[in-house]
Amino acid sequence: MPDALTYMDVLQQTLLEDESMDRTVLTATVPATTTIADVQSRADTRRIPIDKVGIKDIRHPVRIKDRGGQEQHTVATFNMYVYLPHHFKGTHMSRFVAILNGHEHEIGVSTFREMLSEMAERLESEAGHIEMRFPFFIDKKAPISGVASLLDYDVTLIGDIHDGKPKMSIKVVVPVTSLCPCSKQISDYGAHNQRSHVTVEARTRGFLWIEELIEMVEAEASCELYGLLKRPDEKYVTERAYDNPKFVEDTVRDVARRLNDDERISAYIVEAENFESIHNHSAYALIECDKEIEARKAGSAPDCD
């Protein structure tokens, strides 16, 4: 009895038979199927709702308009979640990606709110949450020489929707210099200083440029940062920080005061973290304020002082 043909024997024989053709075409017969089951929509009997379910850390190109009228083309990292009622087994993960790809090839700030509403509608959810995190660049001039350079900031747009009502927030991480008042007071010369991150998340009820929020923070730091400095500039920023010492507590309080004075901001969280140059740990402070809640408590104009 002849040996059974191996897979390679069959393939070689097929290719020999098709030598007269310009190319070999491989075809497959796909069996007919019935309707594909929608497993995610099946009932769940555990009666436990899920607050947020969706996709995390997906990157997509975006365009961001700056105060100068220019557009910055960059790549953002998205987190997209919806509320899942207790009676559904799962959400439809592919729809999140479809929503991203449905907005041409680039997403802008102007389409962010639309995308939030679309997500809640297509996922048939009463609540949804989107975060869009991206690097934002500002062209800054050195304080003395005027030499220009770019400085990057981490920015996140945050959208929440509940029962068709969206709320928008903006979050910025601003790198600054901080100088210790105690160190300056007790030392015969010098003072310890370090780079710090001041993070502000602001819920807005009016239009607010990203640059405006960054400037509020930089104005209250011991000194702001620059990408490029010449020697006269370095002398200036060193002396500026020395003349303007601040504890981490001072920083959050001073930034909070500016946020309180801006009527376009209805709520905020301001954090400051000093990466201590004389310790192997950071100093940290946080202030959180919802102006509308505070106003109702006080029966007066919103104020978190």
Image: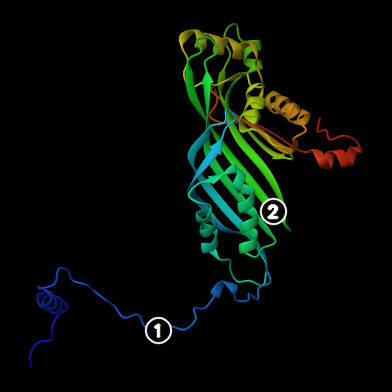
Q: Nearer the viewer, residue 35 or 89?
A: 35
Q: CA distance from mark 2 to mark 1?
A: 42 Å
Determine which quarter of the picture holds residue 46. bottom right
Query: Could you tell me which residue is drawn at 81 percent across and 33 percent down?
Result: 304
Q: Position of residue 20 (x, y in %)?
A: 10, 73
Circle on res. 32: 1
First in residue order: circle 2 vs circle 1: 1
Q: Position of residue 278 (x, y in %)?
A: 54, 22
Q: Position of residue 125 (x, y in %)?
A: 66, 63
Query: In this view, which residue lies farthest toward the right?
Result: 299
Q: Amino acid at mark 1?
A: Ala
Q: Position of residue 297 (x, y in %)?
A: 88, 41
Q: Secondary structure at mark 1?
A: loop
Q: Nearer the viewer, residue 198 or 230?
A: 230
Q: Secondary structure at mark 2?
A: strand
Q: Amino acid at mark 2?
A: Ile
Q: Quadrant of the C terminus?
A: top right
Q: Relative to residue 243, is residue 214 depicted above or below?
A: below
Q: Relative to residue 51, is residue 90 depicted above or below?
A: below
2 vs 1, front mark = 1
Q: Quadrant of the N terminus?
A: bottom left
Query: In this view, which residue lies farthest toward the bottom?
Result: 1
Name the residue tied to disc 2: 161
Query: Could you tell me which residue is drawn at 57 percent across and 19 percent down?
Result: 193
Q: Mark 1, residues whose alpha carbon is within 10 Å: few (<14), some, or many (≥20)?
A: few
Q: Relative to residue 153, is residue 42 depicted above or below?
A: below
Determine which quarter of the picture holds residue 208. top right
Q: Mark 2, residues whose alpha carbon is within 10 Å: few (<14), some, or many (≥20)?
A: many
- Residue 52 in view of the camera: no
